[in-house]
Image (cartoon, rainbow, N blue to C red):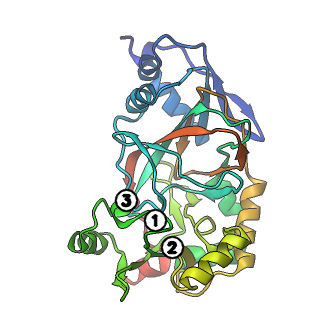
Amino acid sequence: MPSSSLAAPLDAELRPDRPPLLRVDPPGDAARWAAEHREALRALVTEHGVLLVRGLGLREPDQVGAVFARLSGGLMTEREAFAPRQAHGPGLYSSTPWPANQPMCMHHELSYPLEVPGLLLFACLTAPEQGGATAVADAEQVLKALPADLARRFEHEGWLLTRTYNDEIGASLTESFGTDDRAEIERYCRANAIDFTWRPDGSLHTEQLRAAVVRHPDTGRPCWFNQIAFLNEWTLAPEVREYLVDEYGADGLPFNTRHGDGTTLGEDDVQRINATYERHTRREPWQDGDLMLVDNIRTAHSREPFTGERQVLVGLAEPRRLADGRPAEEASRR
């Protein structure tokens, strides 16, 4: 097999409103092509934060798993999932289930565990009829563009994720923690800076304080890295939020976010975050067989509403334990 250093250079198309796009001739063996061009592909991701590769003709989960393995060196097992995914092989998952007519707003995948995926890999086996793009936004630019008062407060205090596990909405205990054994779950929580309470009905309530702004482990530049808006009640469709509050109560929502000091996050602030994301969003409609590589710390992503069938597989790779995973206020007390 030729080494990646001998492979032809790769040139991506750069367009201001779309992610960088690399067009390739369909290879006979996509996994071998990925191995030969791994260094060049990863260099483009390092340079731009994201890369869409078109022409590989990815069609089957086994093929996708082989390509992901060549590009990543190994995929992560998801922990602390907020919604159940279908597994298609070790570390290879379906995209997060979410109503097709509702958007998933910008976020960084699994930004709340202590160990986060540094690289995301997406493969589109079936593109939707309309919509459904996995749009992206540069976290460095978003941080600079956010209202200064909001950014300063979150940088200082961090953000608080609250979760209440139930059997109806979101990931189950087993799907999130890999077990339903209380002692094992408690050990995991203690080891991962998660405060937990078992409620009288047997449900688990957790809280975890995390940094909202982190420095990229390679560039050292600050990035707006969190799921503050995505996992907040005010991002839900109004009828969905009303149902969940009526069903579980304001303090029993399956997931919600707050300021780092525990105070409620207002609807206006959530709208300001999402509006800033929208001004920096780049989108390219999926085509069958596309591959997308995303630097998960530098680049946020979303999923837009769609019609028709949509099948996108996801891999999480390059686990990173961020040195500044605690908010500045908490870190200064240590």
Q: CA distance from mark 2 to mark 1?
A: 15 Å
Task: Determine which quarter of the picture holds residue 184.
Answer: bottom left
Q: CA distance from mark 3 to mark 2?
A: 14 Å
In the displayed structure, 255 sits above or below 49; it is below
Q: Secondary structure at mark 2?
A: loop
Which of pointers 1 and 3 indicates the residue nearer the eye?
3
In the displayed structure, 281 sits above or below 204; it is above
Residue 279 appears in the rendering: yes
- Per the image, the residue denoted by label 1 is 112
Numbered disc total: 3
Mark 1 is on which residue type?
A: Tyr
User: Which image quarter is the N terminus in?
Assistant: top left
Q: Secondary structure at mark 3?
A: helix
In the displayed structure, 278 sits above or below 65; it is below
Q: CA distance from mark 1 to mark 3?
A: 16 Å
- Per the image, the residue denoted by label 2 is 254
